[in-house]
Amino acid sequence: MSVALEALIAESDQQRQIATGVQCLVEGPHRVIVHAAGSTAGLNDWLGAPGSSKFFDGYMRTHGQRMTEELVGREIAGSFVSEDVAIQMAAAAYERALKYAVLDGQAQRPVIALAITSAVSTDRARRGEDRAFICVRTSEGFFLVDVQMDKASEGQDARDLRREEQARFIDLIALNTIFWAAGITPMILDVQGFQSAQFCPAGEGKATVVPVRIDTTPVNIFDQVFGLEVSGEEAPTISEVDWSKYVLFPGSFNPLHYGHQEMARWMEYRTGRRVVFQISQHHPIKVELAFDEDLLCERLRQFRYRHPVVITSHAGLYFDKATKFPGAHILMGADALKHMLNPKFYANWDRSILYGLSCCNNRGTIFWVVDRLVDGNLLTLEDIEIPEAYQNLFRHLAAVNEISSSQIRGQQGR
C-alpha cells in the first residue's frame, strides 16, 4: 500500500471519528461554546455540522488583544499565548453559556466551555515557541492541555505547510478535549512533531489526550478572599484587605447566575470599586443551620478565575458584615433591605436597629439597593421605610435583577 493511500485511509477514518463524536454531542445533554484566539482550522466546521443547533451555542474567534479583552472582561497582561489567558477565556465563555442556557429555559443542561490560545508557525519575528493552551471549563472545574510544537524548517513553503498542520492539530486536540469532557470516546491522534504532558500514549507516534485539572480545593476556605491579589498574596485574609476600596455582595448564590454578575458589573461601573461576593456558612438568624464544607466548596468553584469571593463562618447579618468588613460598601436587593429592617428579627427593634445603623455610619458603610420583583411587584428603595437620621446610608442602584436562583433551581428540577 502506498504512503499516499495510507494517508487517505487515515484521513477518512479520522473524519468518521469526528462525525461520530459530533453526532454524540447532537444527541447528548451538553451545550458547547468555544472561544478561540489565534489560528484555527476546522473546529467551527466540525462542530457546526447538521443538527448542531441542538448543542452548539457558538464559536467566537478573536485575533486582536483588545477584542479578546472585551470578551474576557478584563485586561490581559503578559504573553497573549499563556495558561492564564486560556483560563480567563474559558471562564468568560462558561459564564456566557450559562446565561444562554437560563434564558432558553435549559439551566438543567451541563455546559462545556472551551478556550484556545495559540501561536503557530509564522514568517514574522516572534520570540517564544510554537505553542497552544487549550482550557475546558465544566461544572467539575477547569482542565488544561498545554501543547508544544516543533517549528518548521527554513523556507516560506515549509512554514506555510507547518502552519496548516499545527492549526489543524490544535483543533483536533480541542475537539478531543470536548469529547473527553462530554464522556465521548476520544480519537487517537498522530502526535509526531508535538509534545504535551497531557498526551496518553496509544501506540508509536500516537496518543489520546487527558486534560489535567488546574483548580484545586484550598485547604482552608474560610476568611480568605479568593480571586483577589493583595501585596503579592493570591488569596489574602480579610484583615489584609483595605475594604474601603471594595463593594461586598452577600448571598447564598445557589447558583451564581447572570443576574448577580450583571448587578456586580453595573456596581463596579457606578462606583469604580471592585465587587467581592460573600457567602456566610451559618444562617443569619437560625445559627444552628449551616452549609457543610463540601457544599461550600461547590459554591466556591462557581467563582473561580472570574470573580473574587470570600466565605465566612458567621457574619450572616448585614450589621455583622459592616463590622467584619469595615469601610466596604454593600450591594443588596430591596427585598434583603426589607428583611434587614424587619422588627421580627430583633428583640428590641428600636435599640438594635438604631445601634446597628449607627455602627454602619461610623465604619463608612454604604448600602446600594437594587430593585427586585417580589410576587410580581417591583420593590424599590423608595418603598422601604428607613429611620430618617440614617437615610444617607442607602443609595439606589438603577438596575433590576429579573432572575432569581430559585427560578434557575426550578429549571434544574431542584
Image: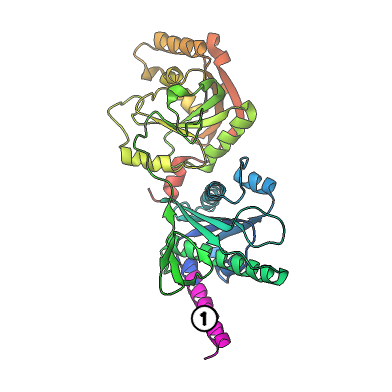
Residue, far bottom: 1
- Counting the numbered discs, the total is 1
The answer to whether residue 332 shows anywhere in this view is no
The overriding secondary structure of the stretch rendered in magenta is helix
Which image quadrant is residue 301 in? top left
Q: Is residue 251 left or right of residue 57?
A: left
Q: Is residue 334 above or below residue 326?
A: below
Disc 1 residue type (three-letter): Ala
Look at the image and say whether residue 175 sits in the magenta stretch: no
Q: Residue at x 54, y 68 (%)?
A: 193
Q: Residue at x 46, y 21 (%)?
A: 325
Q: Is residue 27 above or below residue 393?
A: below
Depth check: give the residue in front, 179 or 292.
179
Q: Residue at x 64, y 28 (%)?
A: 270
Which image quadrant is residue 405 in? top left
Decide: few, some or many residues near mark 1? Use Cα within 10 Å; few <14, some 14-19, many ≥20.
few
Look at the image and say whether residue 10 sits in the magenta stretch: yes
Residue 356: % across, % down:
44, 13
Question: What is the magenta range?
Answer: 1-22
Depth check: give the residue in front, 286 or 114.
114
Depth check: give the residue in front, 51 or 303.
303
Q: Is residue 314 above or below residue 190?
A: above
Q: Residue at x 60, y 24 (%)?
A: 396
Depth check: give the residue in front, 21 or 160.
160
Q: Is residue 109 left or right of residue 295?
A: right
Label 1 sits on a secondary structure element that is helix
Q: Which residue is mark 1?
A: 10
The answer to whether residue 363 shows anywhere in this view is yes
Residue 95: % across, % down:
53, 47
